[in-house]
Image (tube, rainbow, N blue to C red):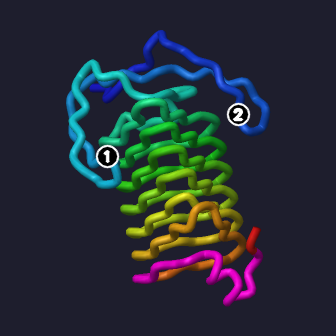
C-alpha cells in the first residue's frame, strides 16, 4: 500500500537556477508515526491517513518506503530525495541531487541542494544552507550555518553560529561544539 499520494493541489516556484517548478501537495494514504522536529526538540508525530503534507515535484522526491515525510510548506524537487525515516518540515527547500535519509530532520527555513547528503540522526534547522558535496551525518546538529564544498560535519558535532560558512574539506568531528568563525581562523580555512 502506498504511503502517500499526490493531490490535485499545485503551486509553482522558481528554483535557485531560475527554473519554473510545478509542485504537488502530498496526502497520507495510511497512518504512521515518525520522529519529527517540533519547537526546538524532537518528538513523535502521528501522520494520519488523509493528512496533507508538503510539496514535491514528483513521486521520485519522497520514498513510498519507510516513514519519511515532508510536512507543512517544505518543498522537495529536481532529483532530490527524502527517504528511509527522514523528516522535512517548516519552509525548507531541498533540491538538486540532495539526499536526506536515515532519521535526519530538516526544519525551519533550511536549504539543502547540489549533491549534499544528510543522514544518520543529523538535524539541520534554522536558516542553514548545505550544498556542494557536503555531508552532515551521525548525531551532528547544524543551526543557521552554511556548509559547502566537500565539507563533512559528523559525530556529535554542533555547529551553531548565525550564518558562518564552512567550505572545502573542513571536518568537524566527534563531541565538539564548533564555533565556525574561530575554527576557520585557527585552521586557516576560507571563511566568507
Please identify, in this view, whether the residue under mark 1 or under mark 2 is nearer the observer. Answer: 1
Residue 86 shown left or right of residue 114 in the figure: left
Q: Position of residue 152 (x, y in %)?
A: 58, 71
Q: Is residue 30 left or right of residue 165?
A: left
Residue 114, disc: none
Question: Which badge, 1 or 2, is on the more N-terminal residue?
Answer: 2
Residue at figure coordinates x 56%, y 51% from the top left = 127
Q: Is residue 60 above or below residue 114?
A: above
Residues packed near mark 2 inside 10 Å, few (<14), some (14 to 19) or many (20 plus): some
Q: Which residue is mark 2?
A: 15
Q: Is residue 9 above or below residue 116?
A: above
Who's the residue at 30% across and 54% down the image?
41
Residue 104 lies, in percent from the top left, at 40, 55
| Mark 1: secondary structure | loop
State the residue at coordinates (70%, 33%): 15
Residue 38's label in the rendered image is 1
Magenta extent = 174-190
The secondary element bearing badge 2 is classed as loop
Residue 64's quadrant in the figure? top left
Where does residue 125 sit, x and y in percent of width and height?
Answer: 47, 53
Extreme residue toward the front, this view: 162
The N terminus, quarter of image: top left
Q: For residue 143: magenta?
A: no
Circle 1 Cα neighbour tier, 10 Å, few/some/many (<14 / 14–19 / ≥20): some
Amino acid at each position: 500500500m502506498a504511503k502517500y499520494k499526490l493531490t490535485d493541489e499545485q503551486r509553482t516556484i522558481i528554483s535557485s537556477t531560475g527554473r519554473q517548478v510545478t509542485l504537488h501537495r502530498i496526502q497520507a494514504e495510511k497512518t504512521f508515526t515518525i520522529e519529527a522536529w517540533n519547537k526546538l526538540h524532537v518528538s513523535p508525530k502521528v501522520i494520519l491517513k488523509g493528512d496533507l503534507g508538503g510539496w514535491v515535484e514528483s513521486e521520485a522526491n519522497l520514498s513510498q518506503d519507510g516513514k519519511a515525510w515532508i510536512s507543512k510548506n517544505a518543498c522537495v524537487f529536481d532529483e532530490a530525495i527524502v527517504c528511509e525515516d527522514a523528516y522535512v518540515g517548516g519552509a525548507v527547500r531541498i533540491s538538486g541531487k540532495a539526499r536526506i535519509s536515515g532519521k535526519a530532520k530538516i526544519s525551519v527555513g533550511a536549504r539543502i541542494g547540489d549533491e549534499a547528503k544528510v543522514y544518520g540522526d543529523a538535524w539541520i534547522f534554522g536558516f542553514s544552507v548545505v550544498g556542494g558535496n557536503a555531508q552532515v551525518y551521525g548525531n551532528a546538529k547544524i543551526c543557521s550555518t552554511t556548509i559547502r564544498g566537500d565539507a563533512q560535519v559528523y559525530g556529535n558535532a554542533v555547529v551553531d553560529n548565525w550564518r558562518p560558512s564552512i567550505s572545502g574539506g573542513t571536518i568537524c568531528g566527534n563531541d565538539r561544539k564548533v564555533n565556525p568563525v574561530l575554527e576557520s581562523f585557527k585552521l586557516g580555512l576560507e571563511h566568507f
